Image (spheres, grey):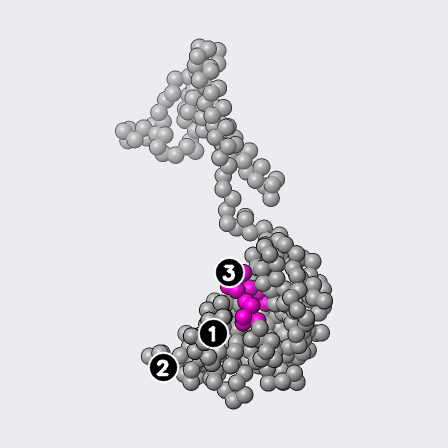
Amino acid sequence: MRNQLTTGKLSILCALYKLDDALNSHGTINPKLPSSFYDTQRRSRAPVQVPGRSFQQLSIAKTMKLCSRWLTITLIYLLFPWPVSQSSANTPQQRTMPLSRSRQCLLVVTPSWQSTNGVLAIFERAQDGAIWLQRGGNIPVVVGKNGLAWGRGIAGLQTFRGPVKREGDERAPAGIFRLSSAFGYGPVNEVRHIKLPYVALTEQSEAIDDPTSRYYNQLVERSRISAPDWHSSEKMRLPGNPYRWGIVIDHNTPPVKGAGSCIFLHVWRGPARPTSGCTAMAEQNLKALLAWLDPQANPVIVQLPFQEFERLRSDWHLPQER
């Protein structure tokens, strides 16, 4: 990157010198100069003639003026470098450090792509770039009935080898995802200890999993939608209360139709009952997470099978579970 910027600087600096030389040279104007350097008063657009000059013909004062102009061009360029474009700033190192802005991280590791059980470890750090410290012990979790598959999250994980998540595949998404909000059955005034934005679920709350709907991958209140256009959804008030408490995992956001929808952390039905694509755990563990998570810390969740965790741990600067 540094070599590219240096080469670019030299090229632009040479162009500035040529421009200055064209304005002060004898004969004709460089044909590549903008039309503003031509005499617009003449229909023939003949080039403006500049009297021929050389260093021998110039007086000492004029020679010093010309040198001063060149020196000014050089100093201005060196002191005020050209800004790097957004695409140039997105270096490979930045793309492979998706946890760089987070201070809270949930790490879920399963034995393989097909495994339905795993463990969750909680990590925190005081500031960006500091060492991750584990908070408490490992928590047992269940994932999708068919295991994990690469999902759409913070990094471009769909480019890796392995299964890719699709709507209805009953796999939980693998990768790194933001934790954006929470929900539950309790009213807002009873959950003030939860710092994430909170949604109180009602009998009208639905998670839309119909890829043809404009509300795809959204949690909505049916009574507030004037013209519901979906043919498939999940009621959030269910027997067994799996959504009594929950956290939204930002998978497939903004949504790509058919790439998977409505992925949550929620209460499990038991350690032998995998989900349709979410990650679930015992209620007391989920409630503890809800009390701890802080949107100011940019919380994320990392979900990987063990082999991928080992491969990516160093490149992504992932925390290490005990």
Q: Indicate which disc residue 223 carries.
A: 2
Q: Residue 55: give x, y in percent of width and height.
A: 48, 14
Distance from label 1 to label 3 (Cα)?
Answer: 18 Å
**Number of numbered callouts drawn:** 3
Q: Residue 183: give x, y in percent of width and height.
A: 48, 75
Distance from label 3 to label 2 (Cα)?
Answer: 32 Å
Q: Nearer the viewer, mark 2 or mark 1?
A: 1
Kindly indicate the quadrant of the structure image that contains residue 288. bottom right
Q: Residue 250: give x, y in percent of width and height.
A: 52, 69
Taking the image as shown, residue 16 lies to the left or right of residue 100, namely left
SS class of the residue under badge 2? Answer: helix
Kindly indicate the quadrant of the structure image that contains residue 148. bottom right
Magenta stretch contains residue 292 = yes
Identify which residue is drawn at 38% across, 20% down: 50
Whether pointer 2 and pointer 1 mark residues with C-beta atoms closer than 8 Å, the reply is no
Which amino acid does the dot numbered 3 rest on? Answer: Gln
Which amino acid does the dot numbered 2 rest on? Answer: Ser
Q: Which residues are magenta?
A: 289-301
Magenta stretch contains residue 303 = no
Q: Residues within 10 Å of mark 3 (few under 14, many from 20)?
A: few
Taking the image as shown, residue 185 lies to the left or right of residue 149, namely left
Badge 1 is on which residue? 191
Say if residue 31 shows up in the picture: yes
Badge 3 is on which residue? 296
